[in-house]
Image (cartoon, grey):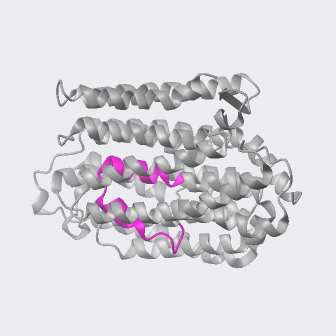
Amino acid sequence: MLTLPALILVPLAGSLIAVFSARRSATAPRVVALIAAVAEAGVAVAALVSMLATSGERLMWVSGGNNAVATSRLVADGLSIPLVLLTALLGIVAVAASWRITDRPGTHHALLLGLEAAVMTVFLAGDLILFYVAWEAVLIPMFFLIGGWGHENRRHAALKFFIYTFAGSVLMLAGIIAVVMTVRSITIGEIGNAIPASTQMWLFWLLAIGMLVKIPVFPLHTWLPDAHVEAPTAGSIMLAGVLLKMGGYGLMRIAIPYAPQGFQSAAPVMAGLGIASIVYGALMALAQTDLKRLVAYSSVAHMGFVVLAISTGTALGYAAAMLGMVSHGLVAGLMFLLVGSLYERTHTREIARFGGLGVTTPRWGGIFVFAALASLGLPGLSGFPGELLAVLEGFGAFGWWMIIVAFGALLGAVYNLTAVRRVVHGEPSTEWTHLSDIAPVDLAAASLLAIGIVVIGVTPGVVMRLTDPVVTVLARALGGGS
């Protein structure tokens, strides 16, 4: 299907055009980037329609000759399509968030589109070589986005992001090499000869560590708050919205299928890491005085639910992980968009300096309350079904340890509602008496995300129907211990 290579080629072409269009005017790159992002979303929808119109389970595109090394495979199924659609939507939002960039706009939008193309390749890769190349390629545009358009400590944050994720990727590469040498195939899913159980015990961790860094779980998370705080708004949106999802996707696509017995042995440890991330992330978010850092630590907590769901090893657990990843992409994208919009107008993120923004900027305040409610898991919004299902499946697998998770969820409500009380409610600060409300372009982008949050919250089946065939097969194979 040509729609699959188009998902990679469209943003790449837009990236090249954006660079050269900057020679004509400062406005041209953003227009080019918006057109490319909207076109990418159209191609993503076309891929979904094509998949549903065929078997409803899988699309594949193969290029190359008979030589397996020269062959590239792109595959779209129930694991990848929800994340492809999420990436396409957040691509539009990221361009909107960059609309007022005046410093080298051509390069900025080119990197943004290049990042989107690399992430799409990760989610579509049908062989291990392409998967790893795309995984590493994602580092390059994000590194330059943080280092080139970030805030005061951007170089330190960019370097820390690169070192942590690259170190994890090196271990993952060792695991991929071990897989290829054992099964004699680079095609994802074509395992061939069974990998010995003794090998799986260490193979799973080699593959998983790089993915756990990307998620990230406690205590491998320390790069994330700095990267988020220092990144430009578009970088934070893409980082939280889609880059973190690469870790959860990689666990379900690569690590678990190739080392199922290793995963079964590691599942209690994985659950412990998820639980620790939920509680630690919530406690740290509650302690923050910087609004953007609060949202960054909340990502650690929300992705902890994803790790917990995956660790259950059940079909519903995997479905909960997918729901959690899609929901977090929408909610975190909205939160970072709002914080970035506020920072552009106030040049501060200090919570103590705000107050009464619901009166001063009613549209911004209303959307922020909505986003906080989605983040705390209000029923009817996207944060609720995935995290509830993760807890239920976790209780079936790990019993009363879920009491700790419930405590983490309670802390999530506390830090979100505290942020709402301190920023939106209260006496309006005289410092921001004449503060303008959210810009129309940001309002349009926020509306797209809000619609997605409501749709997933009211009808989570739109995601679960897509993922069900894949996660059922994955859980059945895991249950068979092969």
Q: Where is residue 60 in the image (x, y as percent from the top left)?
A: 69, 29
Residue at position x 52%, y 30% from top? 7
Q: In which quarter of the image is residue 297?
A: bottom left
Query: Foreground residue, 390 or 276?
Result: 276
Query: Measured along the vertical axis of the image, is residue 364 above or below residue 21?
Result: below
Q: Which residue lies furthest to the right in this view?
A: 480
Q: Quadrant of the N terminus?
A: top right
Is residue 147 on the magenta stretch? no
Q: Residue furthest front?
A: 67
Left or right, 328 with respect to 98, comes to: right
Left or right, 40 with respect to 257, comes to: left
Query: Measured along the vertical axis of the image, is residue 34 above or below residue 467?
Result: above
Is residue 232 on the magenta stretch? yes
Residue at position x 37%, y 55% from top? 369
Q: Where is residue 239 in the image (x, y as percent from the top left)?
A: 42, 52
Residue at position x 46%, y 28% from top? 40
Q: Quadrant of residue 91?
A: top left
Q: Is residue 267 visible?
A: yes
Residue at position x 27%, y 39% from top? 107
Query: Measured along the vertical axis of the image, is residue 349 above or below residue 287?
Result: above
Query: Measured along the vertical axis of the image, is residue 314 above or below residue 279?
Result: above
Q: In which quarter of the image is the C terminus?
A: bottom right
Q: Where is residue 362 in the image (x, y as percent from the top left)?
A: 26, 48
Q: Which contiguous range is marked in magenta?
A: 217-245
Q: In which quarter of the image is residue 26?
A: top left
Query: Foreground residue, 208 or 245?
Result: 208
Give the total number of marks visible in the rendering: 0
Q: Position of residue 118 (x, y in %)?
A: 48, 41
Q: Can residue 332 be seen in this view?
A: no
Secondary structure predominantly adopted by residues drawn in magenta: helix
